[in-house]
Image (cartoon, grey):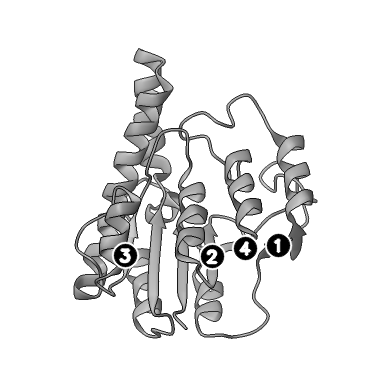
Amino acid sequence: MTKNIVIKFGGSLLFSDGGTINSQKITEFCNIIKNNTQFDSIVIVCGGGTVARQYIRAIRASTENEVLCDLIGIDISRINSRLITSEMKELAYPQVPKSFEELSVAMSSYKIVVMGGLQPGQSTTSVAITVAEYLKAERLVILTDIDGIYDKDPNLHKDAKLLERISYDSLQKLILESSVNTQASAGEYRIFDAVSLQILKRSGMGVLVMSGKKLNQFSKFWNNEKEIIGTIISK
């Protein structure tokens, strides 16, 4: 049976605090995957990160066109994808798929596939979930800049607690309680938004959300070690 995995790599993880490309982080991430090829098919979905948000803010100020802002974010996420593709060298499919048709062709190469956004109004988290559903992936992992899903925003509340497990319904309640008018705006997606949650509920898949800031937890997961810090979302 084919073992597929989809990894969402947050765009913010590609850059240092000063906004420069974090080549060391990219190399470390790619080496973890290279050193243990336990999966038959690997798809990595990159986010746009801080660079995309800078472009989006500039375009929004002059056009107030959210679709155009989304398109710019998608372009940046695809450029980010090329950073990982180049580091993977011959192990990676050389092109960034821009549709599910192109993804299907890329998968037939049996190489690691790296991609970004697909269409306006859809976060790269939604893309990762949809790709995982399409491929019937065995595992779906979301690497972000915090340890997982908290009961409230850990950036605003020091007493926020990391949730080791959470159900779809409980996550939906958290999203609704913390939602703001900009939740669906380009570049403003959180770890999960309402659209990505609905896709996840439809698929019935479980997903592991964990930190990519320090890749030791991802390395533990990749090498089948126990006691991993993160959040498992499931039915």
Residue that carries the numbered disc 4 in the rendered image? 205
Q: Point out the tag, 1 or 4, that comes first from the N-terminus.
A: 4
Query: Dot 4: within a 10 Å radius of its alpha carbon, few (fewer than 14), some, or many (20 or more) residues?
Result: some
Amino acid, disc 1: Ser
Q: Position of residue 136 (x, y in %)?
A: 50, 67
> Helix, strand or loop at disc 1?
strand
Residue that carries the numbered disc 3 in the rendered image? 113
Residue that carries the numbered disc 1 in the rendered image? 234
Query: Dot 1: within a 10 Å radius of its alpha carbon, few (fewer than 14), some, or many (20 or more) residues?
Result: some
Q: Nearer the viewer, mark 3 or mark 2?
A: 3
Q: Point out the tag, 3 or 1, that comes first from the N-terminus.
A: 3
What distance separates the C-alpha of mark 2 from that of mark 4?
11 Å
Q: Position of residue 232 (x, y in %)?
A: 68, 65
Residue that carries the numbered disc 2 in the rendered image? 141
Q: Nearer the viewer, mark 4 or mark 3?
A: 4
Q: Point out the tag, 2 or 1, that comes first from the N-terminus.
A: 2
> Helix, strand or loop at disc 3?
strand
> Helix, strand or loop at disc 2?
strand
CB under 8 Å between callouts 4 and 3?
A: no
Identified at 38% across, 52% down, the residue is: 15
In the rendered image, the quadrant that contains the C terminus is bottom right
Amino acid, disc 2: Val
Q: Nearer the viewer, mark 2 or mark 1?
A: 1
Which quarter of the picture shows residue 173? top right
Q: Nearer the viewer, mark 2 or mark 4?
A: 4
Identified at 50% across, 63% down, the residue is: 212
Amino acid, disc 3: Val
Compared to residue 234, the image places residue 56 above or below, namely above
Q: Point out the tag, 4 or 3, that comes first from the N-terminus.
A: 3
